[in-house]
Amino acid sequence: MQESQIPQIAALDAANFSAPWDEASIRGELENPLALWLAAEGEAAEGEERPILGYVGSQSCFEDADILNVCVRPEARRQGLAEALMRELERRLIPKGIETITLEVRASNLPAIRLYEKLGYSQVGTRKGYYEKPREDALILQKQLKEDR
Ligand SMILES: CC(C)(COP(=O)(O)OP(=O)(O)OC[C@H]1O[C@@H](n2cnc3c(N)ncnc32)[C@H](O)[C@@H]1OP(=O)(O)O)[C@@H](O)C(=O)NCCC(=O)NCCS
């Protein structure tokens, strides 16, 4: 992720999540040594900036990385972009010594749950009423990276 991409990423976050990250918080991640965010750009139309098609954000703590958000622009979905972003994130986290990736997902978010299952995540817990607007349980999913090495 680069500084110039942050306004588009914040706009996508606001359009897709009930508790979005604002621009200043995302900008803070660029200076956070424990954060790793990746953004995927599409082709620019004549005279316009390159559109952000999707992004994934993570923060690491010791050997575990948390995925904070993953999002793909609606018109770019079902083309393998989220899968590619998640796989690239794993590829870059492994050399940093990360052994597990953990994330939370709304219990009703089937597209995301299918994505994580495809990538080898499995459920390790539930957080009751974790999400607001609307209130909903979170499934806690985790993937061990070690066995991939
Ligand atoms: C979840 C999301 C990131 C998936 O992005 P995407 O680029 O469309 O996903 P991909 O094309 O990489 O799909 C990879 C796999 O995920 C699963 N998947 C993705 N979208 C799906 C859907 N609508 N229904 C069922 N499975 C789906 C499939 O297993 C798919 O593999 P396949 O194409 O071989 O069947 C996207 O729908 C999104 O941005 N949603 C809104 C934000 C969100 O909910 N983020 C997750 C928060 S935890």
Image (cartoon, rainbow, N blue to C red):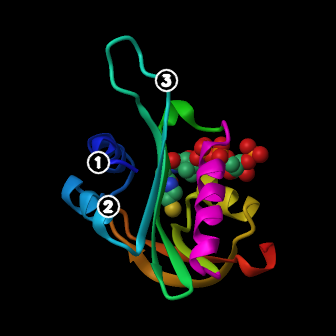
At x 40%, y 75%, the residue is: 34
Q: What element carries label 1?
A: helix
Q: Residue 30 carries which label?
A: 2
Please provide percent x and percent y for residue 13.
Answer: 35, 50
At x 65%, y 82%, the residue is: 99
Spatial separation of the CA atoms under disc 2 and disc 3? 24 Å
Range shown magenta: 79-99
At x 65%, y 38%, the residue is: 78
Residue underneath mark 1: 3
Instruction: Establish whether ligand 1 lies closer than 8 Å to the Cβ of label 2.
Output: no
The image shows residue 88, relative to residue 66, as above or below, that is above
Q: Does the magenta stretch include residue 7?
A: no
Residue underneath mark 3: 43
On screen, residue 49 versus residue 126, left or right, reads left
What amino acid does circle 2 point to? Answer: Leu
Check contact, mark 2 vs mark 3: CB within 8 A: no
Q: Is mark 3 on a helix, strand or loop?
A: loop
On screen, residue 74 versus residue 21, left or right, reads right
* Mark 1 neighbour density, 10 Å: few (under 14) some (14–19) many (20 or more): few
**Which badge, 2 or 1, comes first in the chain's sequence?**
1
What amino acid does circle 3 point to? Answer: Glu
On screen, residue 79 versus residue 149, left or right, reads left
Check contact, mark 2 vs mark 1: CB within 8 A: yes
